[in-house]
Amino acid sequence: GEDVEQSLFLSVREGDSSVINCTYTDSSSTYLYWYKQEPGAGLQLLTYIFSNMDMKQDQRLTVLLNKKDKHLSLRIADTQTGDSAIYFCAEIYNQGGKLIFGQGTELSVKP
Amino acid sequence: NAGVMQNPRHLVRRRGQEARLRCSPMKGHSHVYWYRQLPEEGLKFMVYLQKENIIDESGMPKERFSAEFPKEGPSILRIQQVVRGDSAAYFCASSPLTRGTDTQYFGPGTRLTVL
C-alpha cells in the first residue's frame, strides 16, 4: 500500500535539537527524501538517503533509517528560528517515479 | 541554472471556467510530475510525464483533468469546468532520468482559487 505517516506538530526552543519522525510502508523504496516547505513556497529538497544506508549526515542534518521497522527520522542540530517550516518525508513508490508524501510535520522554533 | 518554473503563481477562476497551469522543467530534465496539495494536507501525486508521453496518471481525477508535455514548450495541467474543490496548490517537479531513483526538484507552485 501507499502510506507515509508523520506526526503533525513539533515545537522546540532555539538551539535545541529537533527530531522529526516518519514511517513508510513500501519496503521496495530505494530512496527516501526530506523536503522543507516554508509558508506560501514550494518544496525545497533538504536531503535524501538510499535504502541500503542506515545514516546520512549533512551539516546540521542527520537522517536515520531503520529499514526493518520502516522508520525514518530527520534530526536538525542547533535548531534556528529560520528552520520553522513544514517538513515532509517522501518515498519513491514501487520504483515507479511518483513520490508518496507524509502529511508534513510543522516545526515551530521558539526563541 | 534556473530551477523549475511554474506560471502563473496565483490563478483565480470562477466555477465552470478552465484553468491552465504551466510548468517548465529544469534544463536537461525530461521528466515532469504534477502534485496537488489541498489545504492543510500533504502533496498527492497526480501524473508523471515524459516528452509526448504519459507514464503514470494513476493520481489524476477521471474527469475534467488532463496533462500534456509536448515536444516543445512547457508541460500543461488543464482543469476544465473547475469546481470549488479544485482550489489547491499545484506543484510541478522535474527529474533528469527515467526511474524513481532520480531526485525530483519542485517548482514554486500555482495556487488555484475557485470562486
Image: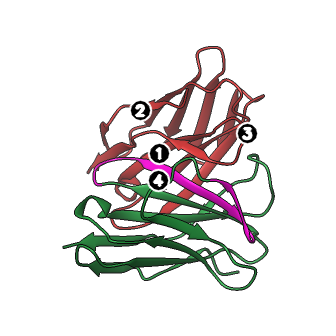
Q: Which mark is residue B62?
A: 4
Closer to viewer: mark 4 or mark 2: 4
Among the chains pictured, the one given green colouring is B
| Residue B95 coordinates in the image, percent (x, y) | 71, 62
Q: Which residues are magenta?
A: B39-56
Give the residue at the far top of this rendering: A68
| Residue A34 coordinates in the image, percent (x, y) | 55, 45
- Mark 3 touching mark 2, by CB under 8 A? no
User: For the residues marked 1 and 3, what is the alpha-carbon distance in whole angstroms?
Assistant: 19 Å
Among the chains pictured, the one given red colouring is A
Residue B54 inside the magenta-drawn segment: yes
Main SS, magenta region, reads strand
Give the amino acid at mark 4: Lys
Q: Secondary structure at mark 1?
A: strand
**Residue where numbered disc 1 is placed:** A88
Closer to viewer: mark 4 or mark 3: 4
Q: Nearer the viewer, residue B103 or B31?
A: B31
Closer to viewer: mark 1 or mark 4: 4
The structure residue drawn at horizontal position 44% and vertical position 35%, both measured from the top left corner, is A20
Write down the chain letter for disc 4: B
The structure residue drawn at horizontal position 24% and vertical position 71%, both measured from the top left corner, is B114
The structure residue drawn at horizontal position 38% and vertical position 61%, both measured from the top left corner, is A38
**Residue where numbered disc 3 is placed:** A95
